[in-house]
Amino acid sequence: GAVVSQHPSWVICKSGTSVKIECRSLDFQATTMFWYRQFPKQSLMLMATSNEGSKATYEQGVEKDKFLINHASLTLSTLTVTSAHPEDSSFYICSALSVGGYTFGSGTRLTVV
Amino acid sequence: GDSVTQMEGPVTLSEEAFLTINCTYTATGYPSLFWYVQYPGEGLQLLLKATKADDKGSNKGFEATYRKETTSFHLEKGSVQVSDSAVYFCALSDRKDSSYKLIFGSGTRLLVRP
């Protein structure tokens, strides 16, 4: 079946630095990928929709300059958290859409210290 | 906008008990409905789905029926096991404006005791 690889699975960074998270569809092409944020014991909040070769569409309240999304190929989307602060600490999950439906990555736990 | 409302958890049941997790939705179009499960320390997995009214999704003993008249998609299982302990998310995809984004409910944590 469809597999989405998300890397890294966890990362600790210092406040003020930037962190890049990668999301790859391993055996299919994904024209659309989604980025979610999940707070502890809470639901997934959609951050943005990423379409290959075009600018991402951000949900209301999500800072596009802070959460940079690039979808340069049909198999790779990246989320860069710029100038990270402790309040950005969270679990970030990507999802890729194919004809078979939605496939989720295993998530990235970001801790900003 | 579109939204999904789930019953609050946690839900605690004894093994072999009957499970119902309520889910209702609001959508302007004709959404597809999903149940996802997240086991401790793992990512989301699709449990079942239904794409039109009166469809019944089923998998691993779980069932949910797409009820357009009550805008509901309640999850049921006749006899839960300890291994069913997880967080369950109801979700919808409305495909408006060529957007296929998936909107999630708040999640319901299920704990099954032996």
Image (cartoon, rainbow, N blue to C red):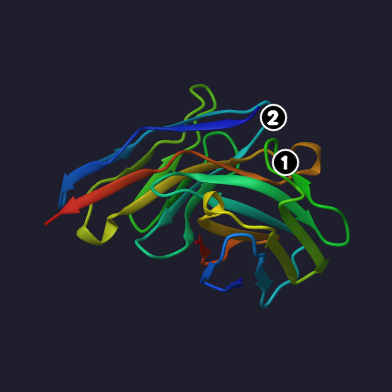
| Residue farthest along the top direction in this orientation | B69
Which corner quadrant of the image does residue B8 belong to?
top left
Q: Measured along the vertical axis of the image, is residue B100 above or below residue B7? A: below
**For this rendering, which residue is in front, B4 or A14?**
A14
Counting labels gives: 2
Q: Are marks 2 and 1 in contact (CB under 8 Å)?
A: yes
Which corner quadrant of the image does residue A7 belong to?
bottom right
**For this rendering, which residue is in front, B10 or A8?**
A8
Q: Earlier in the sequence, mark 2 or mark 1?
A: 2
**Residue A92 is at least partly visible in this image:** yes
- Residue B57: give x, y in percent of width and height: 47, 47
**For this rendering, which residue is in front, B82 or A9?**
A9
| Residue farthest along the right direction in this orientation | A53
- Residue B17: give x, y in percent of width and height: 17, 45
Label 1 residue SS? loop
Q: Quadrant of the N terminus of chain B?
A: top right
**For this rendering, which residue is in front, A65 or A57?**
A65
Q: Amino acid at mark 1?
A: Arg
**Residue A102 is at least partly visible in this image:** no
- Residue A9: give x, y in percent of width and height: 51, 72
Q: Amino acid at mark 2?
A: Gly
- Residue B58: give x, y in percent of width and height: 43, 51
Sort mark 2 into few (<14), some (14-19) or many (20+) by Cα contacts within 10 Å.
Answer: few
Residue B29: which disc?
Answer: 2
Sort mark 1 into few (<14), some (14-19) or many (20+) by Cα contacts within 10 Å.
Answer: some
* Disc 2 with disc 1 on a shared chain: yes
**Gap in Å between the C-alphas at discs 2 and 1?**
8 Å
In which chain is the residue bearing label 1? B
Residue B95: which disc?
Answer: 1
Q: Quadrant of the C terminus of chain B?
A: bottom left
| Residue farthest along the bottom direction in this orientation | A27
